[in-house]
């Protein structure tokens, strides 16, 4: 909560239609720059062992996670890559639950369809489709703001948001902010809390809530822990995509899925779901499905 007032202006874009009134008083890039200036200790010393930290909160059925970190990539290359809607499909599809993603231009806007399923391999026809509206919310010199918004998600969830902000740093690096969240229903909260208190009791997030009798950290569980895990998965998906751009085009997909797995495998307590050979095999098959789906829609220029 100590950073709540600082972040309120930026977060309100995700949860309120009045965000632009805040923007006039305090530009988002100024807020993000202030977060960076005040977070040097967190970036240098945290449980990730990387220049990376997160904050999360849940209130009135709304759960949001903010992941902040530093990419070892120039700001200009981040802008060039992430302002392209099609690239977000390649990013999203690294997530184990995203079995395919397609992009399509419609009435001057870009729509991304996520095909959501289980951790194991599933063909697209066995998944749930969630349609995200892609919006380049701000693209000014020295600042990038991308928002993916879906009004409705699986199991009655609403107001899904994935947001990406970036600022240039010295030495060819970029400070980034990835936020992820959605609104659920009372029935879903009761069902998920029942799951996390029984079969899913071992699933945890990254926020430390205390220590056990051995002095080991105790991590947050339940629905908030689940949202934290997904936010970090998307953060690492963006990072893996950016790292693949240095490879020849023909080998980029293989580089992406390998890098994503290695990044997430560092945090097995939170993120382990599949052995590497299974993840790679599933993603290779799902990638073929994604290409087939995209061909059926056409590949409009962006």
Image (cartoon, rainbow, N blue to C red):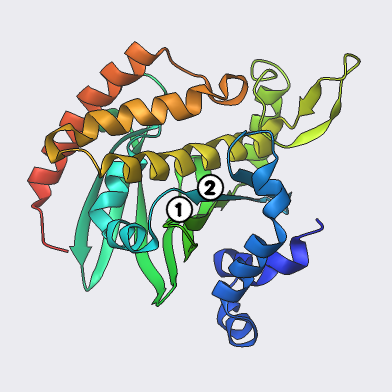
**Residue 17 visible here:** no
Q: Which residue lies furthest to the front in this view?
A: 171
Q: Are marks 2 and 1 in contact (CB under 8 Å)?
A: yes
The residue carrying pointer 2 sits among few (fewer than 14), some (14 to 19) or many (20 or more) residues within 10 Å by Cα, namely some
Q: What element carries label 2?
A: loop
Left of 60 or right of it: where is 106?
Answer: left
Task: Say which label, 2 or 1, has the lower sequence index.
Answer: 1
Q: Which residue lies furthest to the right in this view?
A: 213
The residue carrying pointer 1 sits among few (fewer than 14), some (14 to 19) or many (20 or more) residues within 10 Å by Cα, namely some
**Residue 165 drawn at (x, y percent):** 48, 62
**Residue 143 drawn at (x, y percent):** 45, 71
Front in this rendered view, residue 180 or 183: 180
Q: Is residue 291 above or below residue 160?
A: above
**Residue 28 visible here:** yes
Report how far apart the C-alphas of labels 2 and 1 lie in the structure: 6 Å
- Residue at which label 1 appears: 152
Quarter of the image containing the N terminus?
bottom right
Q: Quadrant of residue 93?
A: top left
Q: Is mark 1 on a helix, strand or loop?
A: strand
Name the residue located 59 percent from the left edge and 67 percent from the top edge. 32
**Residue 281 drawn at (x, y percent):** 27, 17
- Residue at which label 2 appears: 157
**Residue 83 drawn at (x, y percent):** 31, 63
Front in this rendered view, residue 281 or 130: 281
Name the residue located 28 percent from the left edge and 43 percent from the top edge. 90
Name the residue located 28 percent from the left edge and 46 percent from the top edge. 89
Front in this rendered view, residue 29 or 163: 29
């Amino acid at each position: 909560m100590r950073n709540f007032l600082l972040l309120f202006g930026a977060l309100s874009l995700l949860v309120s239609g009045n965000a632009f009134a805040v923007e006039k008083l305090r530009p988002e890039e100024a807020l993000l720059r202030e977060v960076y200036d005040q977070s040097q200790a967190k970036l240098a010393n945290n449980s990730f062992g990387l220049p990376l930290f997160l904050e999360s909160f849940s209130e009135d059925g709304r759960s949001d996670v903010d992941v902040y970190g530093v990419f070892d990539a120039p700001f200009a290359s981040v802008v060039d890559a992430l302002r392209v809607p099609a690239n977000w499909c390649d990013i999203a599809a690294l997530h184990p639950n995203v079995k395919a993603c397609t992009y399509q231009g419609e009435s001057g806007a870009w729509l991304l369809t996520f095909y959501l399923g289980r951790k194991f391999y599933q063909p697209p026809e066995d998944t749930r489709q969630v349609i995200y509206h892609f919006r380049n919310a701000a693209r000014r010199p020295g600042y990038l703001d991308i928002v993916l918004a879906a009004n409705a998600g699986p199991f009655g969830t609403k107001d899904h948001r994935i947001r990406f902000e970036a600022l240039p740093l010295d030495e060819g690096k970029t400070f980034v902010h990835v936020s992820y969240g959605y609104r659920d229903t009372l029935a879903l909260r009761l069902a998920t809390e029942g799951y996390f208190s029984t079969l899913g009791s071992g699933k945890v997030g990254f926020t430390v809530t205390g220590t056990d009798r051995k002095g080991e950290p105790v991590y947050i569980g339940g629905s908030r822990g689940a949202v934290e895990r997904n936010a970090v998965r998307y953060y690492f998906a963006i990072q893996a995509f950016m790292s693949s751009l240095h490879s020849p085009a023909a080998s980029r997909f293989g580089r992406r899925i390998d890098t994503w797995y290695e990044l997430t495998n560092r945090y097995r307590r939170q993120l382990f779901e599949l052995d590497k050979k299974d993840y790679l095999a599933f993603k290779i098959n799902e990638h073929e499905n994604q290409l087939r789906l995209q061909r059926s829609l056409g590949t409009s220029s962006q």
